[in-house]
Image (cartoon, helix red, strand yellow):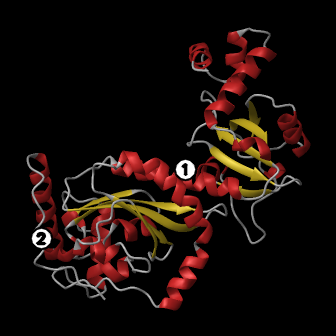
Amino acid sequence: MHDPSRAYPAPASDGGAGSERLLAIRQARRTLLQATEAGVGVPGIEPWIAASWRRCLARGQRPHERVVFDCVSRAAVRRALEASSALRQTAGPVIERTLGRAMADTGYFALLTDARGIVVDVQGPADTRNPHIHAIARIGVDLSEQAVGTTAIGAALTELTPVWLHRGEHFFEDTAVYSCAGAPLFGPDGGCIGMLDLTGVLTPERRALKHLVSVTARRIENALVLQRPHALTIRLTWPGHLPGDDDDGLLALDAEGTIVAANRTAVEMLDLRHGDTGWPHAQAVFPLPVADLFDTARRQRPALELPTCTGLRVLALVQNGRDDALPLKSREAAMIRHAVAEARGNVAEAARRLGISRATVYRKLQQR
């Protein structure tokens, strides 16, 4: 057990607009404690934060109570680490590559938890000499809403959407030293498998971290999809855009054409449902012979419009499994060159086939 010391300095003022923001948060806390029934609005606070505060109050928790950051049992830690092995191995390099430089001068660090809010990895400059950092930056600490009240971790796992939480927006007074951004992580089977949290202590508000944590979460999810054994990948976007970045929908198919992995974007674009037997066969998603998809990959054709069973059309880049290890920019450049060659040098025709503008084709060719 570890209690963060009350002797530690109180949160410093952000100054200017930051001070006004902290004042608004304090006023919102007073408002909520005076009107706890559901449905009462709390000015200055996001509805999901107010909902979390109410859940804490309903559990009998009170903001002034001391927070004890407990680790789960050794057996539970071992189970959590074993179950999250693939997530940790995949997320580690992505977090280091994406967050290392972006957060280098901020004092923020990264926590990775499982779907219950148990910390399974800590990365970044987490100075554990600080009692507030030591309290949370430990493998096995339970940071669920039930354990420590309103946090970005509990909120991301409850709301299943990226969140930002600043100081007094946390439920307990003890946790008002933290500022954090969180994003849920969805596995290749579509379910939430954990979350990524970026936390700072006694730091100015940096709402841009919500975008950074969202981008990093997408990259982790995409890497998890591509790690599944597969014969074919399909990158999806809407017509008018070019597939080849982290925002793509991403499907992995086996040799029979059954979907074996999908990222969250593909799930939403195609309205996919993961059932008792797994993901559906590709032909239940795209009304065309699955052999046509494999032929497209074999011929290394550029992105093409595909009909879907929802009645919408998508732009799809279909590749053999071995080809999806190429960097995105390399695949994009190769796809554009192939389209221009197929159009016999006619850039306007290549742009039409790709569903993008001629200016984009020229710009991308100049960046080779």
Is residue 171 in view?
no
Q: Is residue 268 above or below residue 348?
A: below
Is residue 182 in view?
yes
How many residues crowd mark 2 within 10 Å: few (<14), some (14–19), many (20+)?
A: few
Q: Would residue 44 be found to the left or right of residue 163 on screen?
A: left
Residue 236: x percent and y percent? 67, 40
Seen from the viewer's position, the closer of residues 122 and 257 is 122
The C terminus - image quarter: top right
Residue 270: x percent and y percent? 67, 49
Seen from the viewer's position, the closer of residues 102 and 310 is 102
| Mark in front: 2 vs 1 | 1
The N terminus - image quarter: bottom left
Q: Amino acid at mark 2?
A: Arg
Task: Residue 333: name its quadrant.
Answer: top right
Callout 2: SS: helix
How many residues crowd mark 1 within 10 Å: few (<14), some (14–19), many (20+)?
A: many
* Image point (56%, 16%), residue name: 363
* Image point (64%, 38%), residue name: 327
Q: Is residue 241 above or below residue 163?
A: above
* Cα distance between the residues tagged 2 and 1: 39 Å
Q: Amino acid at mark 1?
A: Arg
Return the residue at label 1. 219
Residue 107: x percent and y percent? 27, 56
Seen from the viewer's position, the closer of residues 183 and 1 is 1
Return the residue at label 2. 30
